[in-house]
Amino acid sequence: MRRAAATGLGVTCALLLLGAAARGADAAAAATRPDPRVDEAVERGLAFLAAGQKPDGSFNSGPGTAYPAIPGLCAMAFLAKGYLPGPGKYGENINRAVDFMLSKAASDGYLGANEGRMYSHCIATLVLAEVSGMVDSNRQTRIDAVLPKAVQVILSAQRVPKQGNNKGGWRYGPGSTDSDLSCSGWALMALRSARLNGAAVPSQAIQDAVQFVLSHHSEQHGSFGYHDGTSYAITLSGAGLLCLELCGQHGHAATRRAAKYLMNVYEQLPAQERCFYGLYYTAQGLFQIGGDEWQRFSRWMYDYWIPRQQPDGRWDRGENGCPYYQTAMVVLAFAVPYRQLPIYQRDETVDEK
């Protein structure tokens, strides 16, 4: 399973990008390119992540957080700025993170044993799918052995019999009979990334997941929620919006409502219990919408969070007891306009007038 061999949706994505270039996408890119202070903040954040990585690829992030999701998110942060595995800057940091994730894979491909569970598994699967095709041949061989199994773990977990609006989603364990939007967002992104990379992910699995996301949308409020359409809406509405956009639902009434909802509440993100998670998803989702929504939100995001970066490059408000998680999430939010990660590519016509 390698990015160079991507088919189906991957070809479609490539054609969209080529078509966008032919239509003058450079102007749209210039409109969303971060200013120099964003570059500086991102680089300082990445330097903090690199300095905190241990030789085995994990991070000294305290009890209960040394599981594959943390190195995975940090690797994504490096990739999001355009750094690649290998001999270049931060290349070995990415390699070590990949090695750590692979070392945690069980014989059936499950990456969530002991700590993190399906959150860890889905994030690690997403990162391995994103980096597949970029690594050296030895690591690629190991990824090729683990990634198809990891994808099957996600597919099998979705097929566990569930009732009501739990159908089509995921939760804490592979055998969970209920679902929530938070874990399901990571699972759906992992499946989409793997499919873009040539994996045999059935269309029905994506369709069922989309229906699950829609079942957690409130038409009245415009929000998406954890178990319904309104619970933890400020932090999760970006997740619902992003999932629909990445699955080809651009222009769906639910995405328009969610964008409008987020534009009314995004300034409340810093006061939320999971503000970094919410920031990450809101940035990713509104970038897919583009236009004035992204411009307004991104200006606020940079103005609010850049002054709150600490001298050593971290962002740290104690969330999850892990400054590496928090810093990686801010970097991933800031780095959206760089468009380096295949999973987050968008149709550039969203910014055409």
Image (tube, helix red, strand yellow):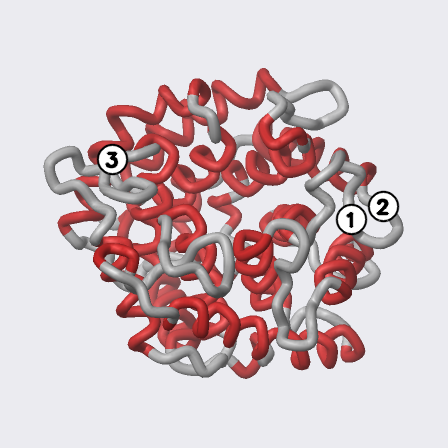
**Res. 279 visible in picture:** yes
Query: Answer yes or no: do the residues labelled 2 and 1 have beta carbons within 8 Å?
Result: yes
Nearer the camera: disc 1 or disc 3: 3
Q: Secondary structure at mark 1?
A: loop
Q: Secondary structure at mark 2?
A: loop
Which picture quadrant has residue 61?
top right
Three-letter amino acid code at disc 3? Thr
Q: Residue 214: percent from the left, percent from the top?
A: 22, 53
Q: Residue at x 57, y 68 (%)?
A: 129
Q: Residues within 10 Å of mark 2 (few under 14, many from 20)?
A: few
Three-letter amino acid code at disc 1? Ser
Three-letter amino acid code at disc 2? Lys
Of the pair 320 and 279, the residue shown nearer to us: 320
Per the image, the residue denoted by label 2 is 54
Q: CA distance from mark 3 to mark 2?
A: 40 Å
Nearer the camera: disc 3 or disc 2: 3
The relative height of residue 58 versus residue 12 in the rendered view (above or below) is above
Q: Secondary structure at mark 3?
A: loop
Left or right of residue 46: residue 161: left
Q: Residue furthest left?
A: 220
Q: Residue at x 33, y 28 (%)?
A: 296
Per the image, the residue denoted by label 1 is 58
Per the image, the residue denoted by label 3 is 230
The relative height of residue 154 versus residue 69 in the rendered view (above or below) is below
The relative height of residue 144 versus residue 78 in the rendered view (above or below) is below
The relative height of residue 175 versus residue 281 in the rendered view (above or below) is below
Q: Residue 279: percent from the left, percent from the top?
A: 45, 33
